[in-house]
Amino acid sequence: MLPITVSRYARLGFVAIIAGLLSACGSMGSLDPANLISSGAATQPSGPAHAEAVEIDCPQIEVQDGTAAVRVGGQTNDSVRYQFTIANTARECHVQGSQFSVKVGVAGHLLIGPAGTPGGYSAQLRIVIRRDSDQKPEISKVYKIEANTAGSAEAPFQFVSEQLMLPFTHQQADQDYTILVGFDTGRVGETPKPHRRKHAN
């Protein structure tokens, strides 16, 4: 569903930086997409027809192998310009008549590499909702993820999708669908800031 190939890091230094950022993400509430979803979650419309909320088991999220990060640059550590990495995901479902809605949240980091320049960058994030019965996509959408380091070496990003609508047949929707998230390579853009690169001492 997500044909993405991410090269291995050539040196351990860059890996160590990424690992440190990801471990820090786990304790940072500001990088929890569940908070973003809850703060802007859709509610059941008011009225007698919606007096009682219908429970639903929301489909699980999977980050496909090789799609959790996308990097731009060469094969060696010194040639890496920047990298986007997924740290956390969340989802929320609501029944709306004969359908149910899914909102997907993704949070992570933009990290500037040794060959990069601080500024604004973007990457393409794909969200696929797959039917488990035939392993085919029911919904497949690509979103532009943006982050700006504002002169530093790293910056967080957070994204929450719009409501994605699916047929509601029974409470166990997690047995019918799986949510896949990951970066698409080859579709990465950038909007670098017009300033000189600052060299670390």
Image (cartoon, rainbow, N blue to C red):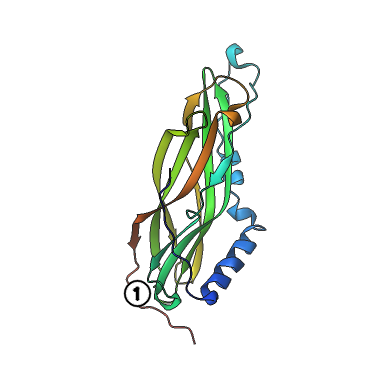
Looking at this view, is 111 or 149 the one in front? 111
Image: 181 above or below 149: above
Q: Which residue is drawn at 55% across and 19% down?
A: 169
Q: For the view shown, which residue lies furthest in the top direction?
A: 48
Residue 162 seen: no
Image location (x, y in percent) of residue 120: 39, 63
User: Is residue 73 left or right of 35 when viewed as pictured?
Assistant: left
Q: Which structural element holds mark 1?
A: loop
**Where, quadrant-wise, is the N terminus in this rendering?**
top left
Q: Position of residue 67 (x, y in %)?
A: 47, 53
Q: Name the residue under label 1.
A: 195
Does the image show residue 123?
yes
Give the residue drawn at x 43%, y 34%. Answer: 139
What is the crowding at mark 1: few (fewer than 14 residues within 10 Å), some, or many (at least 20)? few
Would you place residue 160 above or below residue 132 in this image?
below
Residue 198 position within the rendered picture, expressed as x and y whole percent measured from the top left: 42, 80
Q: Please state if 18 lies on the left or on the right of 73 as rendered.
A: right
Which amino acid type corresponds to the residue marked 1 in the rendered image? His
Residue at 37% of width from left, 71% of height from top?
A: 74
64 or 28: nearer the viewer: 64
